[in-house]
Image (spheres, rainbow, N blue to C red):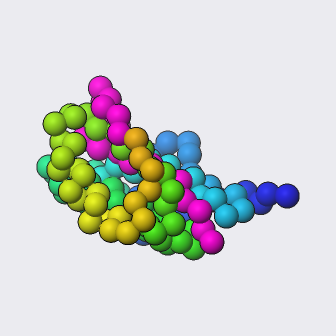
Amino acid sequence: MSSKEIVKTNKAPDAIGPYSQAIKINKMVFLSGQIAIDPKTQQFINGDIEVQVKRVLDNLKSVLEASGGSLENVVKTTIYLTDINDFSKVNEIYASYFSSGKPARSTVCVAALPKNAKVEIDAIAEII
């Protein structure tokens, strides 16, 4: 029997729509997409791609920690970019957050993201 738990932390931004930061079911955690919103101010950070990617990954890390895990537990991510030319810069920063046991991943170029973000990343993790 599964137990569905809503994950919520003030160390990551509040959802900007009718969704949860993450849902934990048994050992699996499904993290909603994060954009570069500062959790302290709840304001979007309109910086370059490097600044945005770091904030996004820090936000995901905080939600994972609130669910009892870490980035090491991530099994799949999806990256949404508004400019595919940012792909190599994103890869460089992403690799520094996932230094061992890199998760499976998809990267998709999209026309637009909420708040005119340059990047959004969601994740799935298994908390052991």
The residue closer to the viewer here, 50 or 35, is: 50
- The answer to whether residue 5 is left or right of residue 116 is right
> Image quadrant of residue 60?
bottom left
The residue drawn where x is 16% and y is 36% is: 85
The residue drawn where x is 35% and y is 34% is: 108
Which residue, as the protein is rendered here, is positioned at the far top? Answer: 111
Q: Is residue 121 above or below residue 3?
A: above
Which residue, as the protein is rendered here, is positioned at the far front? Answer: 101
Which residue, as the protein is rendered here, is positioned at the far right? Answer: 1
Q: Where the C terminus falls, by quadrant?
A: bottom right
The residue drawn where x is 17% and y is 50% is: 89
Q: Is residue 111 magenta?
A: yes
Residue interval drawn in magenta: 107-128
The answer to whether residue 45 is seen in the rendering is no
Rendered location of residue 24, percent (x, y): 64, 59
The residue drawn where x is 59% and y is 62% is: 126
Q: Where the N terminus falls, by quadrant?
A: bottom right
Rendered location of residue 2, percent (x, y): 79, 57
Q: Is residue 14 above or below residue 84?
A: below
The residue closer to the viewer here, 67 or 105, is: 105
Q: Total number of numbered labels?
A: 0
Rendered location of residue 93, percent (x, y): 23, 59
Rendered location of residue 13, percent (x, y): 41, 58
The answer to whether residue 75 is seen in the rendering is yes
The residue closer to the viewer here, 116 or 121, is: 121
Q: Is residue 48 above or below residue 116?
A: below
- The answer to whether residue 70 is left or right of residue 115 is right
Q: Is residue 86 above or below residue 111?
A: below
Q: Is residue 22 magenta?
A: no
